Image (cartoon, helix red, strand yellow):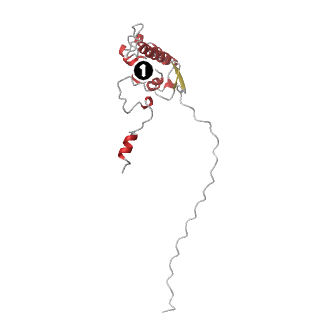
Amino acid sequence: MANEPQPVKPAAPAPAAKAPVPAPVAKPATPAAPKPAGPELKHLVRIINTDLDGKKAIAFALAKIKGVGIPFAHAACRMAKVDINKKTGALTDAEVKKVEEIIKDPIKAGLPRWLVNRRFDYETGQDKHLLSGDLQFTIDNDIKIMKKIKTYKGVRHILGQPVRGQRTRSNFRKNKGKVMGVRRSASAKAAGGGTT
């Protein structure tokens, strides 16, 4: 039995040869894809002597101008018939000019009087909308007048105290100095001894 021939097992199929990987072929340089036709975004747009970011929506970019808030900017864009979500850099020169005219004189453009920032002016009695340097100059003059005629607000400005009724016990420390805590007198220290 030891000399009996062993059955022959069929040979396993030979592994398939892997196909050689082709070397990467360098692509010829192609020109850049053409930009879509349309207005090119300007990075900065100048309105009322202020540079506005061209990537922001016009309604929010206008709020960078001193004297123009977001509600006023929305109203000005609506009056100028400009989409409030349109990028500032995509505005045409005509749209920029129209928005600028409305911001400079909103009452003439038809905006309501309650939206302007200087109603019943102290000197002229007219409603105005002040912007940038004019606004700061007018605020400073109003404070000087209040100080001169010694109104309550003027006196608070003179003293360097808060003007609008805030508490001063814990805030506005710049006027009082650094917080000290409770100080014990010399006699209290001698009578009480030390802390236990």
Which of 85/60 is in front?
Answer: 60
**Secondary structure under badge 1?**
helix
Q: Amino acid at mark 1?
A: His
- Residue to which mark 1 is pinned: 157
Question: Looking at the image, is 165 positioned above or below residue 18?
Answer: above
Report the side of 63 relative to 19 (left or right): left
Q: Residue at x 52, y 73 (%)?
A: 12
Question: Looking at the image, is 111 positioned above or below residue 59?
Answer: above
Position in image of residue 74 (x %, y %): 40, 22
Position in image of residue 131 (x %, y %): 47, 17
Position in image of residue 77 (x %, y %): 42, 20
Q: Residue furthest top?
A: 124
How many callouts does the rendering have?
1
Position in image of residue 55 (x %, y %): 50, 29
Which of 114/1 is in front?
Answer: 114
Splitting the image into 4 quarters, where does residue 28 fall? top right
Q: Residue at x 47, y 18 (%)?
A: 136
Which of 181/87 is in front?
Answer: 181
Which of 194/176 is in front?
Answer: 194
Q: Residues within 10 Å of mark 1 (few under 14, many from 20)?
A: some
Q: Residue at x 62, y 39 (%)?
A: 30
